[in-house]
Image: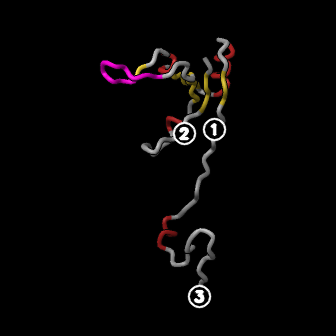
Amino acid sequence: MQATIFKPSKTAMQSGRHNTRQWLLEFDPEAARRVEPLMGWTASVDTTQQLVMRFDDEGEAVAFCKRHDIPYRVVPPRERRAKIKSYAENFSYYKHRGPGSEPLERP
C-alpha cells in the first residue's frame, strides 16, 4: 500500500485556483478493478482507493506517512507561469504574424 502525495492542478472547469492550495494523499490501487456481472458497474475489493486525505502543507502529509509506516512518494508541483497580456494586443496592427516570424515593421 503505497501513497502518493501531490498538490492538485487547476481543472479546466473552474476559473479560480481555490482547490489547488492543499496537498492530497491518495493510495495507489492494490487490486485491479473488475466489471460486476449483475449491474455492469466497475467494482473493486480495495477500499483504500476511495480515501483522499487533505493536508495544509507537504510536511504534514509526509509526517503522517512516517507516523503510520506508509511508504510514500512526493510528486512536486509544477508552478504555473503567468503570461502577461494586454487586451489591446488583440487588435494591434503591428503584432507577430505567427510563431518564429519577425514582427511587422512600424512605418
Residue 24 percent location from the top left of the image: 56, 27
In which quadrant will I find the N terminus? Answer: top right
- CA distance for labels 1 and 3: 46 Å
Direction from residue 51 to residue 78 in the image, left or right: right
Camera-nearest residue between 76 and 84: 76
Q: Please tell me which residue is depicted at 57% across the width and 73% down the height of the picture.
A: 96
Circle number at residue 9: 2
Q: Amino acid at mark 2?
A: Ser
For label 3, the crowd category at 10 Å Cα-Cα, with few meaning under 14, some 14 to 19 and many 20 or more, is few
Q: Which mark is residue 77?
A: 1
User: Which numbered mark, 1 or 3, is in the foreground of this view?
Assistant: 1
Q: Which residues are magenta?
A: 33-42
Residue 107, disc: 3
Residue 87, image x and y in percent?
Answer: 49, 65
Residue 3 occupies quadrant: top right
C-beta proximity under 8 Å, tags 2 and 1: yes
- Pick the quarter of the image with the C terminus: bottom right
**Is residue 83 depicted above or below 72 in this figure?**
below
First in sequence: mark 2 vs mark 1: 2
Q: Residue at x 55, y 19 (%)?
A: 30
Question: Mark 2 or mark 3, which has the lower sequence index?
Answer: 2
Q: Residues within 10 Å of mark 2 (few under 14, many from 20)?
A: some
Considering only vertical position in the picture, is 5 above or below 10? above
